[in-house]
Structures are given as structure tokens and as C-alpha cells.
């Protein structure tokens, strides 16, 4: 099938935050409680129809664990249109890694990509706490990036996240 627009989308973030799970939930509507770690990189595509236009998302999954990162992994960042920087809402360390994730993008991507921040595993949070937003704002140092809180387990905001990204074709 042909398409009108194509976006290369890359998910990055600490190990175990749910990058693979978010992609699986979005593409296959499945969730695996014991998802295996990603080794190297992998991509899947999904076509989204918006206002009569077909937007093809080429969605790349990357390894969060350093030992599974391949030497050329940052070379795939070069011509990426969109980055989804994922952290785990229950894991402070993964939140603290966002700064270095953003540096990685800056150092390896040639174009000025769209970046969104995703706090995943919202199903594990019993009540909302405003601290996450505060920490994100500190980390972003004035940059305004959209934050989504998702759950790859129950599906909260997963379609919304990818739809929001696909919709940006209107601004290109
Ligand atoms: P790496 O490949 O190591 O970088 O990990 P990843 O970021 O791709 O995480 P992955 O999708 O492999 O998920 C890690 C673990 O968290 C798995 O056991 C998942 O089942 C679990 N998990 C992922 N997303 C969610 C979620 O939204 N809620 C809950 N409760 N568990 C989740």
C-alpha cells in the first residue's frame, strides 16, 4: 500500500521501562508480562489514516541495556523524525536518565526532530503525584516537550501517543 507521509520514530530510554511493550500494545494490541530485553535494534511499521491521508510510522525499538546496544545503534538516530523518550513512572533512575537520552539525540540526529517524553507503567501508580512533572521540568530546563503517561499493560494513552505523533504531518 502506498502512503502520503512517512515518519521514522525511535523509542529510547533506560532498560525495562517498557519500550518494546508500548510498541507491541500499539501494533498487535498484546501485552507480555515477562517481555524479553531487546537486543540491538528492530523496527515495525504501522499505517495511520488521518483526514484521508495515510501516515506510515516506521517505529524503531532500541536496547536499553548497554550490553545489548550495538555499536552502530546511534547511527539510526541520524535521520529520525521523531523520538519517544520513555521512562518508568515507578523508577526514579529511569527518569534521571532522560537528560542523557536527550543529549544522545542532540549528538546523533542531524535534523531537528520532534521529541516527546513518555512516563510508562501508569497502571502501577495508585495516585497521581505532581512530582514527576516538576522533575521533568527541571530536566528539560525550559524546553517544552509534551509528556504522556501511558500503560502498555492496560493501554492507557498508547493509541493517543502514536496518533499525536502521526498527526504532526499537518505541520510538515
Ligand atoms: P529493554 O529492551 O531492556 O530496553 O526494555 P524495554 O524498555 O523494551 O521494556 P520491556 O517492554 O521489555 O518491559 C520490561 C518489563 O516491564 C516487562 O516485564 C513488561 O511486561 C513490563 N511492562 C512494560 N510496560 C508495562 C506497563 O505499562 N505496566 C506494567 N505493569 N508493566 C509493564
Image (spheres, rainbow, N blue to C red):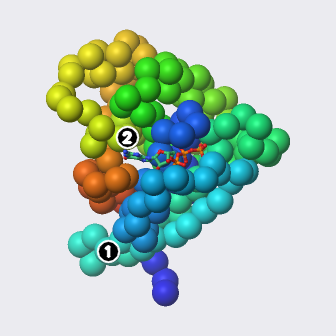
Q: Is mark 1 within 8 Å of ligand 1?
A: no
- Mark number, residue 33: none
Q: Position of residue 64 (x, y in %)?
A: 62, 39
Please name the residue shown 67% across and 37% down the image. 65
Q: Position of residue 99 (x, y in %)?
A: 52, 21
Q: Is residue 96 left or right of residue 48?
A: right
- For this orientation, the residue located farthest to the right is 71
- In the depicted structure, whether residue 141 falls above or below residue 2: above
Q: Which residue is located at x 58 percent, y 37 percent?
A: 15
Quarter residue 104 falls in: top right
Q: CA distance from mark 2 to mark 1?
A: 25 Å
Q: Residue at x 50, y 21 (%)?
A: 93
User: Residue 109: in sight, yes or no?
Assistant: no
Which badge, 2 or 1, comes first in the chain's sequence? 1
Query: Does any portion of residue 116 appear in the rendered image?
Result: yes
Residue 34 versus residue 52 in the image, above or below = above
Q: Disc 2 designates what residue?
A: 120
Marks 2 and 1 close (CB-CB < 8 Å): no
Considering depth in this image, is 75 or 14 the residue closer to the camera?
Answer: 14
Question: Residue 36 location in percent, x, y?
Answer: 61, 53
Q: Element under label 1? A: strand
Compared to residue 28, the image places residue 118 above or below, namely above
Quadrant for residue 121, please give it. Answer: top left
Q: Residues within 10 Å of mark 2 (few under 14, many from 20)?
A: many
**Residue placed under numbered mark 1 in the picture:** 49
- Image coordinates for residue 53, horizontal then vertical, percent: 33, 75
Badge 2 residue CB within 8 Å of ligand 1 = yes
Query: Which residue is at a point 32% across and 74% down the rendered structure image?
Result: 49
* 1 relative to 166 in the view: left or right: right
Considering depth in this image, is 105 or 15 the residue closer to the camera?
15
Q: Where's the C terminus, which quadrant?
A: bottom left
State the SS at label 2: strand
Amino acid at each position: 500500500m502506498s502512503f502520503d507521509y512517512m515518519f521514522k520514530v525511535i523509542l529510547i530510554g533506560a532498560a525495562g521501562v517498557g519500550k518494546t511493550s508500548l510498541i507491541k500494545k500499539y501494533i498487535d494490541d498484546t501485552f507480555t508480562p515477562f517481555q524479553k530485553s531487546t537486543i540491538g535494534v528492530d523496527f515495525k511499521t504501522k499505517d495511520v489514516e488521518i483526514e484521508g491521508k495515510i501516515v506510515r510510522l516506521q517505529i524503531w525499538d532500541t536496547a536499553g541495556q548497554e550490553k545489548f546496544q550495538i555499536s552502530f545503534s546511534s547511527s539510526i538516530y541520524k535521520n529520525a523524525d521523531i523520538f519517544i523518550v520513555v521512562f518508568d513512572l515507578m523508577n526514579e533512575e529511569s527518569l534521571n536518565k532522560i537528560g542523557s537520552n536527550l543529549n544522545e539525540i542532540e549528538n546523533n540526529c542531524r535534523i531537528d526532530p520532534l521529541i516527546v517524553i513518555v512516563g510508562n507503567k501508569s497502571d502501577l501508580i495508585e495516585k497521581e503525584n505532581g512530582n514527576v512533572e516538576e522533575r521533568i521540568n527541571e530536566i528539560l530546563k525550559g524546553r517544552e516537550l509534551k509528556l504522556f503517561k501511558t500503560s502498555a499493560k492496560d493501554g492507557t494513552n498508547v493509541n493517543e501517543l502514536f496518533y499525536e505523533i502521526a498527526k504532526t504531518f499537518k505541520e510538515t
